[in-house]
Image: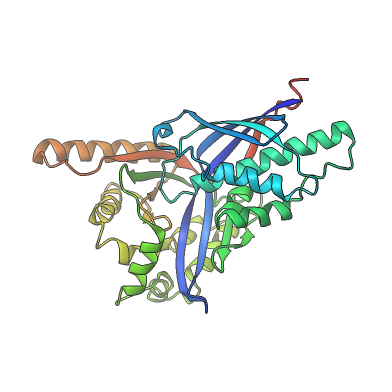
Amino acid sequence: MISKIKVIAPAKINLTFELKGLFEDGYHRVSSLMQSISLADLLTFDIEENESPDIELKATKGKYTTEFPLSPDNLIAKAIRLYLSSMENPMPLKLRVEIEKNIPIGAGMAGGSGNAAAALLALNTYFTERANLEKSQKISPFSQEELLSMGAKLGVDVPFSFLGGTARAEGRGEILQALHLPSDNQALPLHMVLAKPRHLHIATPWAFKKYDQFEDKFSLSEKLKDRGITDDATNFACQNLLAGEQEKAITAFGNDFEQAIFPDYRELKGIKQRFMDLGARVCHMTGSGPTIYAIAQDGEHALHLKEAFEESVLKETTISCAAKSDPVDLFVVQTLDHGVRILDDGILDGP
């Protein structure tokens, strides 16, 4: 029995990112509004029975295939091994995984986590279909709750990548509360431009350390209090999205990391300022960076922002000949209401 399963794995951004102190074990307490976006990797899983486990990863398409790590430590391989070893009756499989890598590496957009979630979904789909076909009691696919718990062992963003949409994250980021917006809600979708300095990667542990060492902290929620809003930023953003108040919600978007990271990476502050000068509604860094998101009025305005950004950089380069700085990759995206999803399961396409 051979099966081909295709999965889309959307990227995510943090519309808000707040740091709320430390747990006793030294980990940071966070509060964040997380959002799936239309930039996505595509993964194709060829699965068949085998005498022994065999995993092969291959990056075939997409802008970032040459940068994609194919070692056994890749999160896709880890997710496959974890899933199979967690089964009550483990079954060795031969898996060939082809990845179209469209999400930048090290961009802080959960590209690796989304790939891991895609692997869990593909395997669970395979065994669900197989159990239905064979009517076997020995094959028992996992529940969504079990898959989320499994994903949490692989990384804090994997459960969100599995669920997707819009969700509030608390604790270390592992406590998720989905925001179920009514179908007639006008708060979403949001249209935006993402900007990722091509060769810049920021290590998350370094970002937390810089924040801890930063003396003059002024949190996102404190900024709201200066405007007479007593609610925490993430909660204010969530409540207003649920109420359909998009304009109010985006006033609470932001990132506590920026104040500590921008002094070391002035190009990020420059990108943010450039977007604001070009007419973005709001513009912030996502997570620990380095990706910046700029929210537009609509899809057409997002395209205009991207073109205007490119033109301004080209003009500046021509005048000053100073563009030895890192080139910036730009993406026009919009928010999504889902996480990883089967595109074409192609189940039972072989004997």
Above or below, comparing residue 26 to residue 103 in the picture: below
Horizontal and vertical percent position of residue 233: 47, 68
Above or below, comparing residue 157 to residue 111 in the picture: below
Image quadrant holding the C terminus, namely top right
Q: Is residue 16 visible?
A: yes
Q: Is residue 202 left or right of residue 341?
A: left
| Residue at the far bottom in the pictured view | 24
Horizontal and vertical percent position of residue 37: 51, 44
Image quadrant holding the N terminus, namely top right
Above or below, comparing residue 65 to residue 78 in the picture: above
Of 201 and 284, which appears nearest the observer? 201
Q: Residue at x 54, y 52 (%)?
A: 187
Q: Residue at x 45, y 63 (%)?
A: 17
Q: Residue at x 39, y 50 (%)?
A: 293
Of 283 and 207, which appears nearest the observer? 207
Q: Is residue 339 visible?
A: no
Above or below, comparing residue 151 to residue 92 in the picture: below
Rendering quarter of residue 282: bottom left
Q: Is residue 135 left or right of residue 92?
A: right
